[in-house]
Amino acid sequence: MRERFARGVSFERDIAQVVRDDALRPKAQRQMLQDFDEPLVETYVGVHKALSETKATVPGVEVLFR
């Protein structure tokens, strides 16, 4: 199980780096992000849920959006 997780994390990092490298190229030379004027590549992003769906009552869990 741990090996599969490590493989997944490694794959995610590799793909993120490929996309970041593409974002650094001039717009005309990009392979994946040619339609973006100023591409921004972020990792470990989540989905915003309504406040009632968050674990706001759990100590140590910070609610970022309200």
Image (tube, rainbow, N blue to C red):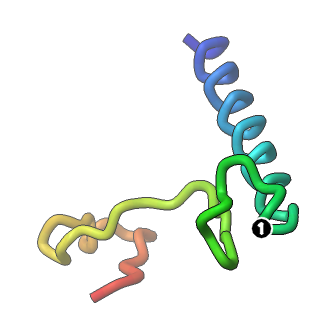
Please state the horizontal and vertical placement of residue 1, each as a whole percent of the image: 55, 11
Q: Residue furthest bottom?
A: 66
- Which picture quadrant has residue 29? bottom right
Disc 1 residue type? Lys
- Which picture quadrant has residue 25? bottom right
Mark 1 lies on a secondary structure that is helix
Q: Nearer the viewer, residue 29 or 10?
A: 29
Q: With 37 as the anchor, is 59 left or right in this view?
A: left
Please state the horizontal and vertical placement of residue 59, each as a whole percent of the image: 37, 70
Please state the horizontal and vertical placement of residue 53, each as a whole percent of the image: 16, 65
> Mark 1, residues whose alpha carbon is within 10 Å: few (<14), some, or many (≥20)?
some
In the displayed structure, 47 sits above or below 37; it is above
Q: Nearer the viewer, residue 5 or 29?
A: 29
Q: Residue at x 79, y 53 (%)?
A: 22
Q: Residue at x 57, y 55 (%)?
A: 44
In the displayed structure, 12 sits above or below 20; it is above
- Which picture quadrant has residue 20? bottom right
Please state the horizontal and vertical placement of residue 23, each as a whole percent of the image: 77, 61
Q: With 28 as the anchor, is 57 left or right in this view?
A: left
In the displayed structure, 17 sits above or below 28; it is above
Q: Quadrant of the C terminus?
A: bottom left
Q: Nearer the viewer, residue 60 or 32?
A: 32
Q: Residue at x 24, y 72 (%)?
A: 57
Q: Residue furthest left?
A: 52
* Residue to which mark 1 is pinned: 27
